[in-house]
Amino acid sequence: MVTADGVPLKVSLRRAMRRKRNTALLLTAPLFMFLLITFILPIGDMLFKSIDNSVVPEQLPRTVQAVQSWNPDAEPVPPEPVYEAIVQDIAEGYENRTIGRVARRLNYEVPGASSLFRKTQRRADRLEPPYKEALLDIDEDWADPEIWRLIKRESDFTTLSHYIAAVDMTYDEQGNITAVPDERQIYLPLFWRTLWMSAAITGLCLLLGFPVAFLMATLPLRLSNLLMILVLLPFWTSLLVRTSSWIALLQTEGVINDILVKIGLVSDDGRLQLIYNQTGTMIAMTHILLPFMILPLYSVMKTIPPSYMRAAKSLGANPLTAFVRVYVPNTVAGMGAGGILVFILAIGYYITPNLVGGRTGIFISNFIAQYISGSTQNWGLAAALGVLLLGIVMIMFLLYDKIVGVDNMKLG
Amino acid sequence: MAPPIYAGPVEKTWYYSFRVICALIFIFLIGPLFIIVPLSFNAEPYFNFTPEMLSLDPAGFSTRWYVDFWSDANWRLAVQNSFVIAIFATLISTTLGTLAALGLSRSEMPFKTLVMALMISPMIVPLIISAAGMYFFYSRIGLASTHVGVILAHAALGTPFVVITVTATLVGFDHSLTRAAANLGAHPTTVFFKVIVPLILPGVISGALFAFITSFDEVVVVLFVGSVEQRTIPWAMFSGIREEISPTILAVATLLITLSILLLTTLELLRRRNERLRGLSPG
């Protein structure tokens, strides 16, 4: 069979299909390119930063070469050529004003490296051989094998040391990876706190969201639409508005404490500390994330025919049994969708824990932010912590996709 | 609403107590928003109700925090930045998001799930991670601490909402309408503007509103990608809460609540119009 202009129908159809496919691709291309530059490459950059170690081989090119021939087990300190190499590297780096970068990088793992470099850099170009004695004259720490082992270990362009630090591990003297003693662990406890507090917030949201969604699903549509506006209003209101209202409510001189004092539940000097701790983070975040639980629950409950409950009751189940055995199992999809959504949003929260969490109610995000722009800058560690957090979120998102399907995501 | 006539005493008790529980949850949900409104008219620089306010003495109320807000050049800059950034970000994300949604909802689209997952990823990735990545990358290409950088970042964060809402409108889209128009001699561009656009418009507008509010409320990315020059209202509120808490923040919050009520009303009207157009019974 051929078309009017003599092309076989099969070929013509294939051509038309291809054209349609290309149109579809072409329509999505602008957004794809846009997201590639504004979003995907930045995330990629973060992945790269978490393993990037180029500063060491770039700033200390001679040293990393020379230190390879040193065997830390055989001789306690490196031989003279290594000292000569580092004097040249430091002198050059000081002239280019780039030596501070590598000093800061090494200081993450050997505290004191930064001041050691700072002491040495100004005099590096005037040092005379033998360089080993000359450096030891400036600072005894140049005889400390720890700094040399670090340079030897971190001489590659990539490193895993940020990840090792991010899971509270460290290298011991033999170069083996070991866990940091319990009392000095920072990030693992913080990850745990982030996870259990997010789980608790998810649980609270479910506890509060379930009755509301149930009520809205059983009321006539006109009334439930009215209630829906009450759910959507906080959803549409700025996060900072809601956080500041919780500060006004919860602080020791705030509205809730005032009421409690007035009705005599607590004395004036026994005002409750409801904010700047875990309680504050929990209350404020439950409030902020509650709509994300109610909306999917409601949309599932709306589809459960009321006849199911009536059927169960007419078969002799009392209302409680009918509810637990018939209604609740039908809402599992909604609970799963809402639960995972709230959990994903909660573990990445930054603003609210920062403002109402005090010292005990902050999350892993707060540490990431602090390492990026705070006083203790460490981009590599921030990136490694970020990638680990992203990994957790991705696992949860795959679960979400399994339960709800990305295509079925709805808003409002 | 009353319990059914046949309900026994246990059922009646449960019926009413369930409603009380729900009412309490709604108070938890809405109360904190509305407690701010009277507090923002406080005559004293406190975050709680003064005795004068409780006795409804006019001396306990004042609009000084609103005057404060309006006369402060920093807040004015923040308002201006917020609107400029949000409007441009909305324009970009609405245009690109609508086009992509049109492509994604075609049955011929290859790798649909993968592309969809990619396009809504800015919504899933925690903001702190997006902000960190953007901070690293935008400083590298010279977009950090510029209005353009913040606008692009916000546009990226807003696109998933447009893609989702427009795709949802297109689910019930009758493709024979476009074929009919083409059959009657309309050029593809005419088909697009005269047939497709009017039908998907409610979805596009609600997506645009989502994108607008995302940018307007966003603070984490502005904190990292922007600087003092790009301060937006949330940026100023964040630093205000951290430094010295003055009820000016509550005045701003009240204004923002008013804005969100307006946006919500618009969305609700759009939703009703959409349901009417599709022949669904009005809610």
Image (cartoon, helix red, strand yellow):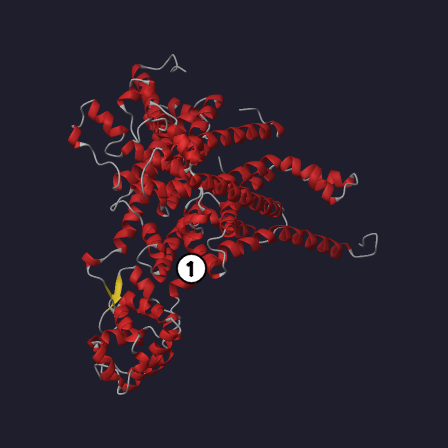
Q: Residues within 10 Å of mark 1 (few under 14, many from 20)?
A: many
Q: Position of residue A296 (x, y in %)?
A: 44, 36
Indicate the quadrant where residue A140 lies.
bottom left
* Residue A68 in sight: no
Q: Residue furthest top?
A: B5
Judge whether A35 appears above or below B235 on screen: below
Please state the total of marks drawn on the protein image: 1
| Quadrant (top left/top right/bottom left/bottom right) for the N terminus of chain A | bottom right
Residue beneath the point at 16% across and 32% down: A270
Q: Residue furthest bottom?
A: A129
Judge whether A384 appears above or below B231 on screen: below
Residue bearing mark 1: A46
Q: Position of residue B62 (x, y in %)?
A: 36, 25
Judge whether A173 appears above or below B170 on screen: below
Q: Position of residue B282 (x, y in %)?
A: 56, 24
Q: Position of residue B188 (x, y in %)?
A: 73, 44
Q: Nearer the viewer, residue A239 or A196?
A: A239
* Residue A285 in sight: yes
What element does badge 1 sit on? helix
A61 vs B140, left or right, is: left
Q: Chain of mark 1?
A: A
Indicate the quadrant where residue A89 lies.
bottom left
Q: Nearer the viewer, residue B246 or B215?
A: B246
Residue beneath the point at 24% across and 68% down: A112
Q: Residue furthest right?
A: A5
Judge whether A156 appears above or below B257 on screen: below
A27 vs A228, left or right, is: right
**Mark 1: amino acid:** Met
Q: Nearer the viewer, residue A286 or A202?
A: A286
Residue beneath the point at 30% across and 28% down: B44
